[in-house]
Structures are given as structure tokens and as C-alpha cells.
Image: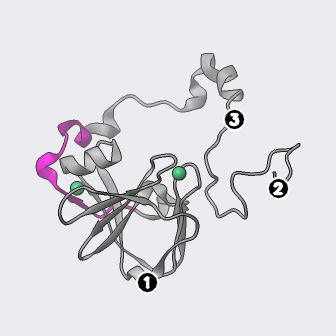
């Protein structure tokens, strides 16, 4: 498969990769934990930067070390990139279809949170299993950008015209 799209939660930043992706990984280092606000950082490398285009805004960048910049949406905060002198990697969860990008290597395991080895063993349930929350769930209106490219975003609300 060639050609991938993705972006941030609010849709202000969208990207497209027109070639095959490189190696997909998770990084357990403390800087990735912080940058993602997560238990580890899931990233996939872009083989050739000219095949990556930002189709809306570009991410804002934080220089997390003398060598590396971390890109994120300045509107909603979604972590999006890891940019080093030897190349750029994109956050796997930001892709429109992250299920197509399985990690094949773990980095930075000296920083690994021990319980991440046992995630599959902890009790699990689906959102719909929580009957008491069903009414609340039914009332939710999502502001998240859909998992595909859109002509305009956010969508024009009824009663609004395009130019106001
Ligand atoms: Zn955003
Ligand atoms: Zn890392």
C-alpha cells in the first residue's frame, strides 16, 4: 500500500505521505512519554521527506533537545512528529488508519514503565458495556476531525453561511 493520510484531533493540521513508510516503533524513553503524554511514543519513520506534505497548517515545533524537534498541533495539542537530523517520524495514532502501521521494534527500553509489559492482562471492557453511561454517550457531539481528508473543516453549521 502506498499513500497515507492523517492529522491532529481538531483537523487544523493534516498530512499526506505518498510513498511507503519506514520502520514503525514504540519508544519508551522519558522524552517520548512526556511528548506524547503517554506510556510510550508510537512513531513511524518517513523514508523520504519530500514524500511528506502538510495539506493544511504545519505543526508547531518544540525543540526538545539540541538535536530533535517535536511537532504538535498548536490548536488542539495532538503530538504529530519527531524530527531529527537524520529524518522525520510521524505519530502512528495520528494516521487515519493506524491499524495499518504495526510497530516492529521497541526503543529506549531503559525508560520502560514495567506495567506496559502486562497491558493485555488487565481487565477490559468496551464503551457500550457501561450501561449507566449510555444516555450520556448518546448525547456526545464529537468535534474530532474524521479519519479521512475533508474539503472544509470544521463543517459549516446549519444556519451559518460560508462567508460569515
Ligand atoms: Zn489540531
Ligand atoms: Zn523516545
Q: Which of marks 2 and 3 is in front?
A: 2
Front one among 81 and 91: 81
- Is 164 positioned to the left or the right of 47 in the image? right
Residue on which the image places disc 1: 50
Classify mark 1 as within 8 Å of ligand 1 or not, answering yes or no: no
Residue 87 sits inside the magenta stretch: no
Q: Give the class, few, some or many, for how many residues have Cα within 10 Å of label 3's Cα (few <14, many ≥20).
A: few
Secondary structure under the numbered disc 2 in the rendered image: loop
Front one among 49 and 147: 49
Label for residue 128? none
- Is 86 positioned to the left or the right of 161 in the image? left
Residue at the spot 43% in from the left edge and 83% down from the top edge: 50
* Residue that lies at the very extreme toward the left in this rendered image: 110
Front one among 19 and 119: 19
Residue on which the image places disc 3: 141
Residue on which the image places disc 2: 162
Q: Distance between the residues labelled 2 and 3?
A: 21 Å
Q: Which of marks 3 and 1 is nearer the N terminus?
A: 1
- Residue interval drawn in magenta: 102-117
Q: Which of marks 2 and 1 is nearer the N terminus?
A: 1
Q: Percent position (x, y) of residue 122?
A: 34, 31
Q: Distance between the residues labelled 2 and 1?
A: 33 Å
Q: Which of marks 2 and 3 is nearer the N terminus?
A: 3
Amino acid at each position: 500500500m502506498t499513500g497515507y493520510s492523517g492529522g491532529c484531533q481538531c483537523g487544523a493540521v493534516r498530512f499526506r505521505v505518498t510513498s511507503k513508510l519506514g520502520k514503525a516503533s514504540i519508544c519508551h524513553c522519558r522524552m517520548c512519554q512526556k511528548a506524547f503524554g503517554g506510556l510510550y511514543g508510537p512513531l513511524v519513520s518517513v523514508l523520504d521527506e519530500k514524500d511528506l506534505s502538510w495539506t493544511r497548517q504545519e505543526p508547531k515545533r518544540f525543540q526538545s533537545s539540541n538535536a530533535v524537534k517535536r511537532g504538535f498541533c498548536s490548536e488542539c495539542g495532538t503530538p504529530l512528529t519527531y524530527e531529527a537530523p537524520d529524518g522525520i517520524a510521524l505519530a502512528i495514532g495520528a494516521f487515519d488508519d493506524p491499524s495499518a502501521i504495526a510497530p516492529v521494534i521497541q526503543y529506549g527500553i531503559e525508560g520502560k514503565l514495567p506495567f506496559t509489559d502486562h497491558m493485555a492482562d488487565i481487565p477490559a471492557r468496551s464503551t457500550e458495556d457501561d450501561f449507566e453511561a449510555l444516555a450520556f454517550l448518546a448525547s456526545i457531539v464529537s468535534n474530532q476531525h474524521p479519519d479521512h481528508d475533508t474539503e472544509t473543516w470544521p463543517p459549516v453549521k446549519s444556519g451559518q453561511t460560508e462567508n460569515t
